[in-house]
Amino acid sequence: MAEAGIVWTRIDNRLVHGQVGNAWVGATGANLVIVADDAAAEDKVQQQLMKMTAESAGCDIKFFTLDHAIDVFSRKTPKKSILLVVHDPAAVRKLVEGGVPIKSVNVGNMHADGKKTVYHESHVYVDDQDLADFDAIKAAGVDLFIQILPTDRKTEI
């Protein structure tokens, strides 16, 4: 088992789905998935679907708002190996600026919408705000890279 604490942080617009459950839980050694997302923390239907995916991977799952995640990680030393999943770069930036001990961030799927353009990979679309958030995350000393699947190569950002 991996060391206790946040062992992997992933940006994925889909949050927890088959790819996260089937590939990333095993690759990271996580035994707890924490979804830090304000909307998902309130959506019981979405939680139930994500819970089924996590359980099929043999993993527990919890749902936190971003503020609750900052609060929890500032007061507790995790005893679990955590795969932290967020929706977008703005969420990671808020967590990092709030003191959550994130060392690296795996950028996964970021879907196209509106004014977003492809960024290095066909699954990663960004706008100016996403790029500003990437810059702030990197400026905080966090390693940032694109990797869709554990078997894919890493592309440093």
Image: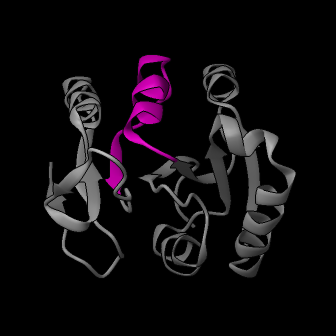
Judge from the rendering whether residue 101 lies leftward or rightward of residue 120; answer left or right.
right
Lateral position of residue 36 relative to residue 147, left or right: right
Name the one closer to the observer, 151 or 18: 18
Counting from the top left corner in percent of width and height, residue 52 is at 79, 73
Position of 114 relative to 46 (above/below): above
Q: Where's the N terminus, which quadrant?
A: bottom right
For residue 72, which quarter of the picture? top right
Q: Give the range drawn in magenta.
A: 87-107
Quarter of the image for residue 16 reads bottom right
Q: Position of residue 30 (x, y in %)?
A: 59, 63
Residue at the (72%, 37%) spot, across then down: 64
Check the image and tell me how it is coloured: one colour
Number of numbered discs on residues:
0
At horizontal 42% and vertical 18% (from top left) the residue drawn is 97
Q: In which quarter of the image is residue 76?
A: top right
Q: Give the residue drawn at x 24%, y 46%.
A: 144
When the figure is inspected, residue 86 is found, relative to residue 67, above or below; the finding is: below
Q: Nearer the viewer, residue 80 or 92?
A: 92
Which residue occupies the foreground of this view, 127 or 143?
127
Vertical placement of residue 13 versus 66, above or below:
below
x and y percent of residue 7 in the render? Answer: 48, 52
Where does residue 125 sit, x and y in percent of width and height?
27, 54
Is residue 106 covered in magenta?
Answer: yes
User: Does the magenta run of residues contain 155?
Assistant: no
Left or right: where 21 falls relative to 50: left
Q: In this view, does 42 lie to the left or right of 29?
A: right
Residue drawn at x 50%, y 27% as measured from the top left = 100
